[in-house]
Amino acid sequence: MSLQMPPDPSLGPLRARPSGMPEPDLAPPVVAESQDPFSTLRIIELFARLPRGGPIALRAITDRLNATHLDWLFSERVVADAVLQLQANWMADYRNSSGIVIEDGPTGAVVTIEDSAKVDPWIVRQATREAAACREVLLEFSRRDRTTGAD
């Protein structure tokens, strides 16, 4: 009596996609959260491109983020939290509050960014730090065996 070997259980070549099969690269919407590096990085990237030296409505910044990142939802509170953290970082680095000023305006909070040569390199450092935090989150995710984080 000869023993038969079971078929190879590994996955071989895949079949061609059926005609009309939709692409699977759709992503669910993301609700931005305070202190989330992915949210903060998007906020800082826009912040770096804002006009300098004059007040900008926080609501306008939030609206631009939502219009730019259609798969994300930014609330004004999340944007304010990120801007306040940037302001605190500026004050820690430069020991003054003139770099990023947040005040009440006639229609809500407004932000004014100092118009000086030191802002761009500083904001790049802020974004670089957040990008590193994003990469760390992604690396940690890739190290997990299961989505629950269980070993």
Image (cartoon, rainbow, N blue to C red):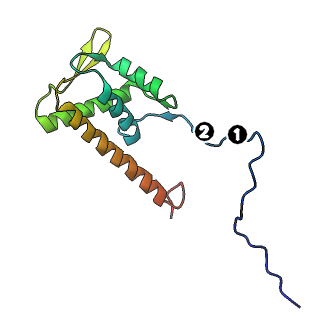
Seen as rendered, the residue at the extreme top is: 106
Residue 34 shows up from this direction = no
Q: Which sits in the foreground, 34 or 130?
A: 130
Q: Which amino acid does label 1 sit on?
A: Pro
Percent across and percent down for residue 121 are: 22, 37
Mark 1 → mark 2, Cα distance in angstroms = 9 Å
Q: Please tell me which residue is depicted at 28% across the width and 8% down the height of the picture.
A: 106
Q: What residue type is labelled 2?
A: Leu
Mark 1 vs mark 2: in front: 1
Q: Please tell me which residue is depicted at 31% across the width and 39% down the height of the picture.
A: 127
Counting labels gives 2
Q: In this view, does 73 lie to the left or right of 83?
A: right
Disc 2, SS = loop
Q: Quadrant of residue 8?
A: bottom right
Q: Residue 22 shows which numbered tag?
A: 1
Q: Quadrant of residue 53?
A: top left
Q: In this view, does 31 lie above or below 51?
A: below
The residue to which callout 2 is attached is 26
Percent across and percent down for residue 91 are: 15, 33
Q: Please tell me which residue is depicted at 78% across the width and 42% down the height of the picture.
A: 19
Q: Do the residues labelled 1 and 2 touch (CB within 8 Å)?
A: yes
Q: Is residue 48 left or right of residue 1?
A: left
Percent across and percent down for residue 107 are: 32, 10
Q: Which sits in the foreground, 55 or 107?
A: 55
Q: Is residue 51 above or below residue 138?
A: above
Q: Residue 107 shows which numbered tag?
A: none
Q: Is residue 2 left or right of residue 60?
A: right
| Disc 2: CA contacts within 10 A as few (<14), some (14-19) or many (>=20) | few
Q: Can you say which quadrant of the picture contains the N terminus?
A: bottom right
